[in-house]
Amino acid sequence: ANGCRAYCSTKIFDAGQPTAASHPELLKEGEMTPGITCDEYISRRKKLLELLPEKSIAIIAAAPVKMMTDVVPYPFRQDADYLYITGCQQPGGIAVLGHDIGLCMFMPEPTLHDVTWEGNTAGVNEAQEIFKADQAKPISELQQMLSGFLGRSSEVFHNVKTATRTYTDSEFFLKTVVEGKVKDLSKYTHELRWLKSPAEVELMRKAASIACQLCTEDFWNFGVISVSFTVTRFNPVVGGGPNGSVVHYSRNDRKVNDGELVLMDIGCEFHGYVSDMTRTWPPFGRFSPAHIELYELILETNKECIKLCKPGISIRQIHEQSVQKLYKGLKDIGVLKNRASSSRTYHQLNPTNIGHYLGMDVHDCSTISTDRPLQPGAIITIEPGVYIPSSFSVPERYQGVGIRIEDEILITDSGYEVLTGSMPKEISHLESMLNDYSPQTEAGCIRTAASS
């Protein structure tokens, strides 16, 4: 009232990642990571224990730091299973989960040199106070305690693809491998991660919204978009002209000429959850007649497949419908001619599936079969496409053309929700957007810092 300001004298410890105390603008009270509460993390651990056989344990490793040079690391991204179970976004830890021990987190022991160069990290105290571990120990005690854990366990589960030598080189672990007791944990963690909680859905809505907004705002300058999205979950696919027919083209070293298309597959990550979207457009503002033929076929397939999305149908069933639609359409257009070899030719022009699961990873929950009937809370992509190399034996107007239209779809109780619906895909909308901008061109080419 008198104009004076009060200052808090309480020192907030830097735990190596945002907390509700250190970053109230990011986390609400009770959240362990942005958008996800402590209670939800504890519930995840209980659910995983319910899936694990009696007298078994799970070992989950944090992702290691990967080095670009001897002193420069690549941007760190946490292992999805480790983050999902522990909430810890930092490298170097090992988590052990068991029926008798609960969650035991083994935390790194940074030196003064580490802290000076890399900053503070969470330790044993933070493992219990912030991550709500039942037990916490320094990583130096892992080998000793692991021998006891393994000796009392009938089965040991770990993520085979992301295992680290921190524990796999242990003589006790190697002995357990020889005894045939070591199995893959992914079938259990993917089962939990497959269906998203309401909090996870909100994070994925935001990730999709960010991707759509950035793509719309910088629609012309796809060089800028390419750079912007490179620092997120995956390198963007930005294929100009004939490079659009390369499904995962990534070189970004070619100018885009008048009369060509640009295919851009992009996504961002928001607090551990990713987005994935593809749009194809003519950077000079107009689709050619041949492009329109192909684009409308892909767009119709995209829309029809989205309408199929609902509880009870599987990705494989949607894929089969897409194949029938595209196969007939490409024959009607004249891209597929020889009846005897047209089936083989079709798969050369479209070698991809109609979609995949999406979540903490771009191709999420790979152990969940695409034959599994979808349920509310599953998030998938719908991404029909056609990829015609320049050398392919088709009418010249179709050669060197790649088109894909990809959307994120949330399965709901009543059907579906398109999370990327704010990004236009109709020809008229795309051309209208493109012609609202004035690109700088030289000799019929768009010139950008990182054009594809």
Image (cartoon, rainbow, N blue to C red):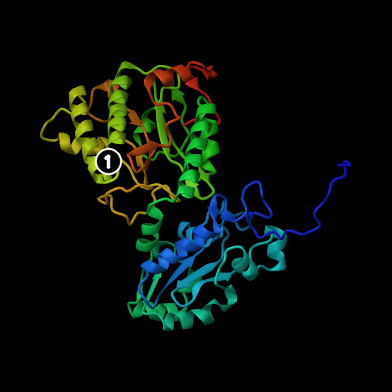
- In this view, the residue in front, 197 or 300, is 197
Q: Pointer 1: what residue?
A: 351
Q: Quadrant of residue 285?
A: top left
- In this view, the residue in front, 46 or 243, is 46
The correct choice, above or below, for 202 with respect to 305 in the image is: below
In which quadrant will I find the N terminus?
A: top right
The correct choice, above or below, for 182 with respect to 368 in the image is: below
**Other residues around mark 1 within 10 Å, as few (<14) / some (14–19) / many (≥20):** few
Q: Quadrant of residue 294?
A: top left
Tell me what residue is drawn at x 18 percent, y 29 percent: 328
**Left of 258 or right of it: where is 226?**
right
**Left of 38 or right of it: where is 419?**
left
The correct choice, above or below, for 14 with respect to 428 in the image is: below
Q: Under tag 1, what secondary structure? A: loop
- Residue 37 x %, y %: 54, 55
Q: Quadrant of residue 423?
A: top left
Tell me what residue is drawn at x 45 percent, y 17 percent: 432
Q: Is residue 218 visible?
A: no
Residue occupying the far front of the picture: 1
Tell me what residue is drawn at x 40 percent, y 34 percent: 278
- Residue 185 x %, y %: 38, 65
- Residue 68 x %, y %: 57, 53
- Amino acid type, label 1: Pro
**Left of 207 or right of it: where is 418?**
left
The mark tally for this picture is 1
Q: Is residue 180 visible?
A: yes
**Left of 311 or right of it: where is 56?**
right
- Residue 197 x %, y %: 44, 51
- In this view, the residue in front, 91 or 364, is 364
